[in-house]
Amino acid sequence: MSVFYILLLFMIIAAIIAVETDNLLSSVICVGAIGFGGSLIFLFLRAPDIAITQIVVEVLGLIILIRATISRDRTFITGDREFFGMVVSVVIIFVIFLAGMKVFETLPTFGTPIFANVPDAASQTYISEGMQKTGAANLVSSVILDFRAYDTLGEATVLFTSIIGATVILRKKAKKLLEEPDQ
Amino acid sequence: MSVPLPVFVAIPLVTAFLLPVFAKRGKAVATVLANLATISLLVLAIGSIGQSRVYEVGKWSIPLGINLVLDGLSSLLLLAISVVSAAAMLFSVRYMEQYTAKAKYLSLFLLMVAGMNGVALSGDIFNLFVFLEIASLASYALVGFGCGHEELEASFKYMVLGTIGSIFILFAVALVYGNTGSLNMAYISESIQNSGLNPGLAFALALFVVGFGLKAALVPFHAWLPDAHPSAPAPISAMLSGVLIKTLGVYALARVVFNIFGISLATGWLLLTLGILGMVAGAFLAIGQWDFKRLLAYSSISQVGYVMLGIGLGGLIIAREGNLAWASLAILGGLFHLLNHAVYKSLLFLTSGSVQMSTGTRELREMGGLAEKLPVTRATCTVASAAIAGIPPFSGFWSKLILVVAAIQAGYYWVAAIIVFVSLCTLIMYLKVQRYVFLGELPENLREIKENRGSMLVAMVFLACLCVLMGLLLTPCLRSSILDPAVKVLVDGVAYSANVIRM
Amino acid sequence: MLYALCFLLFMIGLYCAVTKKNMVKIVIGIMVMEYAVNLFLIMLGYRMGGVAPIIGRSDLESGLGDFLSKSVDPLPQALVLTAIVISLGSLALMISICIRMYEKYGTFDITQIRRLKG
Amino acid sequence: MKGMTIIVKTISSWVKVLIFLFGIYIILFGHLTPGGGFAGGVILASSYVLLMLAFGREFAEENLSLPVASKLDCVGALLFAAVALCGLLYGAADFFWNFIHQKYLMGTDYEFNLVSAGTIPLSNIAIGLKVGASLFLVVLALSIFRPEISGNKEE
């Protein structure tokens, strides 16, 4: 139990540093720390699939982020922010946070998942009959690629979309004359 | 004709996956394929009118698997999406020759269509989120397609706000799952009816409103729209204003509020207020604009306000247990306006694209006297302006009339007054467009311009014909097959879950 | 209490995305929000003293009874897998827009990038 | 970008193979052990990214050029869609119907075998191909774009 608190506090501290530091590169590295903490916490929450995916995605995401920040002229942030606007947004966010605190009382306490209390929850069936119904021993695999494979098609499409979008945004020349051939 | 429902998503998806293969050569083949895909979707959507089915993906009965639900509201949305996308795709055949990387453009366009179709058909809340993300990501990339200064800035602003909206929606989905243990909309709705609305679910509802509100550009969350819609290429502006904000925003919000959580007094007032705010603020901001597409974009905010007003008014009457006839009349007005706005606003954006392509500018003060130079564009633009301003024989008049009648019958006289006032503002706005673009004096530098040819004209004339004919949807025969089932879905509210589970 | 800490992480991300004026900082704020939501979903499915939802040979031989009462919820894990990939996709797109804008404007500061009125 | 020192180059040329093999293992055994198409695909991509970081972009592009990666991306996506459509077309059943398992393997003694679980390993392979190619593509696209910026700055 306490391991979760320690890791979450680590993530929160890393997040605060990532948000508040003025050096973009250290900010990006702190994001890496959050992701690494997240990956560890997933492992302790008994989600090895997510832990593996999180850590490899983290590595690649960091490479992408560092590409964006490194060897830019100004990695330090300069200039003041408008004080009034910041105070207002901090107050609003704090109010939402206080409102949100009440919400978590309605959830089942940590450690007793909701599916155990709902009689016809899908997860019950996934655990008890997922293996014979799909033949996969890894139930997460059986959920994402059989029971909810349609979601996964959507997810693969999201990745496809964003890659096409990134190559479109990064192409060298966007506009041409009407009759000019495409290069 | 009864095709399996995933075909609506599979056709654009598979075509989109194929298209980048034709990157350099075979641009013509890619264009033809993309057009075939949108036209076949149009045929399928017309074929699906009046049906209502549940399709279980992978033969897993709910709640094990994901289900797709085709009911009146979904088929109305499918129809709007396929009409606008067919026209916009036809328009892009020539218009997009100004840009490079056309095959990728077509692919992104089809992915956006696939995402919207997926949202309209989905019966599972997480699946709705995934398809919403597909459509949103494709639209972020398409807004920045020109890669100029303004395009990129608009795209970044849109992307940040849109992603925050998506995360809110995901958080709401997580809260709903934590409270009900289910992701299927019908099961969630049943569980909420049994246990009542606790603070957790109320917070989730608030997050849904903010998230979908960001996608629909309802007024406190509209900052991205006036930048993003003008910056996109014209056919994409038509898609974004015509259907994207409605599918991802209004439709999803209506589905969540009416069919999952059930309408209550508070949510009814909330929707009505959001609608009125949007209508008034959009109209006032639009009148002052001098950029043609920016004016149209602000006008979109105002017109989406009408749709929200109709739906919210209907919901309010239902929650007050008033006369259901007036409630359904208000919702009918809202949904009919949604369909109308999809047609004429996309037509207006296409004409603005045609004007921009001929003259090279969007600034109203630099144009004038284009009536003789661009006769077809002028004629279609006039039809669309008349329709949006609510001149009697055209479609826009009827939907506004229905809204006014419903508001008066239900005793909300001030709402009726606001509707009439805003439609006067709309009239002024479009008189301004007519005056500065097509009448007046032709500037020296625009003497040589010619009317655009080919597919662009076909697309504009197609939509203009629809604009004129849309009023026919109110004839009993068409109304009972297209509009009434959609209204019934919303009026029935949480009976949705029983319908889906039984089907 | 753990849920509240998770929500705090979410709010730090939201604060960063809303108030910061640097594009990379905004992207980082959005990433932090995504981490928080993913973590929240996984926490919902955790069972005290649970095991991972992967059936081993020994579980099958001893009958599934023990596994049934101990396995954590596989459904949120599937959702988070989807959400992680979606966030990676949007990160890639966002960063490419940032880089392209840096090339155009020579800065990451959004207060200096004000061509549009809003 | 000329790449890094000889030490880094030597080690990464060894490690690269191991990472690649590990990615393939994660993909193929995704239905039995933790992991799956996504994690494996990202690992495949990162082995190429490692190559790119150590040896420079040109070397990585010789191994897997941009158009090829783009085509692989499309092929992976199409394969996954094909798995879905097979379920639809096979015996007039449903979209994404796990036809291999339901038709042939159900109730047999194939548990814990590599060929258990019907279409799930096939989907894993398709997704792994798709994810690997597309993520490599985006890193490559980002790094190709980079020199131009610094070029612009110097002018």
Image (cartoon, helix red, strand yellow):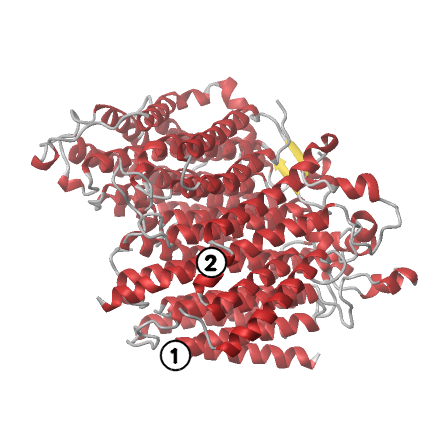
Q: Is residue B458 above or below residue A81?
A: above
Q: Which residue is painted at 73% across and 64% down in the image?
A: A113
Alpha carbon separation for disc pair 1 and 2: 32 Å
Q: Position of residue B119 (x, y in %)?
A: 54, 43
Q: Position of residue B461 (x, y in %)?
A: 33, 23
The number of numbered discs placed on residues in the rendered structure image is 2
Q: Say which quadrant the C terminus of chain C sits in.
A: bottom left
Q: Residue at x 56, y 34 (%)?
A: B8
Callout 1 touching callout 2 (CB < 8 Å): no
Tell which tag, 1 or 2, sits nearer the viewer. 2
Residue at (52% x, 30% y) in the render: B325
Q: Which residue is mark 2?
A: D61
Q: Circle 1 sits in a helix, a strand or a loop, which is it? A: loop
| SS for dot 2 | helix
Viewer-nearest residue: B39 or B434: B39
Q: Amino acid at mark 2?
A: Glu
Q: Is residue C61 visible?
A: yes
Mark number displayed over residue B131: none
Tell me if residue B191 comes above or below residue A6 in the rendering: above
Residue B339 seen in the figure: no
> Seen in the image, is D38 located left or right of residue C74?
left
Q: Which residue is mark 1?
A: A23
- Within-10-Å neighbours for mark 1: few <14, some 14–19, many 20+: some
